Amino acid sequence: MLPADLIRFKQTGKQITILTAWDSLSAAIVEASQADVVLVGDSLGMVVLGHTTTLPVTLDQMLHHTQAVGRGFSRPINEQPLVICDLPFLSYQCGEDKAVAAAGTLLKNSCAAAVKLEGAEPEIISVIERLVRMGIPVMGHLGLTPQAVHHLGYKRQAEDSTSQEKIKQQAQDLQAAGCFSLVLEHIPGELASQITNQLKIPVIGIGAGKGCDGQVRVTADLVGLTEKQPPFSKPLIQVRQLCVEALQSWVKTQQQQEVTPTNESSQ
Ligand code: KIV
């Protein structure tokens, strides 16, 4: 699977499915689900590293987790899902050279074939243009951009007409800069549908209604592994609860087993 295949899926009307993975175990499960794409999202900072935001995640950590994801796949390489890796906070905001080095490090040393980065400010557009010129496929991300949490919070974005016009323009700018696809997170569904219809590249929604070309979900939220899920990602099953109950039952059984004192301890 190549980034260009996603553009073909949009043209033929095939819905694109993207799930996150963060290690070999989750990658094996997501590969078996037949999702088109595995996103090694920097949400792993919260999902598996225990941070309260994605900001502390480092490039080394993204590389470490993406390498583990690659080891989790079992299908032949040409049948594996496309792997996209998030560029973490401060790996692309400090200039084009630093961004090329960060993205290149991920593509050179892991199974990632593309990177995702957030925003569409002029500096970010220049970074994307440079990455694309260097042969590095880029997925954009607008709406709720978690790396800007201290500015935007986690609330739904683009509620008023000014910010809706801005995001429409930004989506066009990302397409013009060479992004092969775009994630829209937590924005009104009607707006996401309009952007989807206006763009040639596939638009992938999360908390952005059903009118996008595909959907992305944080796998840990979708299976109920995380303690609390965002309002737009209801769990399909309660894996956390099932695990706790099964393990509690095992622990109790072990604790109830009689221990016969040895001669030594009774002396
Ligand atoms: O980090 C992540 O998992 C993401 C998805 C929410 C799109 O960016």
Image (spheres, rainbow, N blue to C red):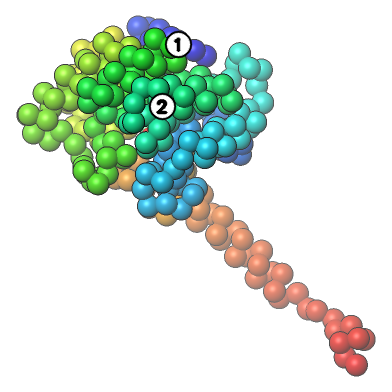
Q: Secondary structure at mark 1?
A: loop
Q: Secondary structure at mark 2?
A: helix
Residue 135 in percent (x, y) is at 45, 11
Residue 267 in percent (x, y) is at 90, 93
Which residue is tagged 2? 98
Residue 210: quadrant of the picture: top left
Kind of residue indicated by mark 1: Gly
- Residue at point 52% right, 14% down? 1
Quadrant containing ligand 1 reads: top left
- Residue at point 43% right, 12% down? 134
Cα distance, mark 1 to mark 2?
16 Å
Give the answer, above or below, for where 133 lies relative to 58.
Answer: above
Kind of residue indicated by mark 2: Lys
Residue 64 visible at all: yes
101 or 233: nearer the eye? 101
Horizontal arrangement in the rendering, residue 201 relative to residue 42 (left or right)? left
Horizontal arrangement in the rendering, residue 215 relative to residue 224 (left or right)? left
118 or 218: nearer the eye? 118
Residue 114 in percent (x, y) is at 46, 20
Residue 246: quadrant of the picture: bottom right
Question: How many residues crowd mark 2 within 10 Å: few (<14), some (14–19), many (20+)?
Answer: some
- Residue at point 44% right, 15% down? 136
Which residue is tagged 1? 135
Q: Earlier in the sequence, mark 1 or mark 2?
A: 2
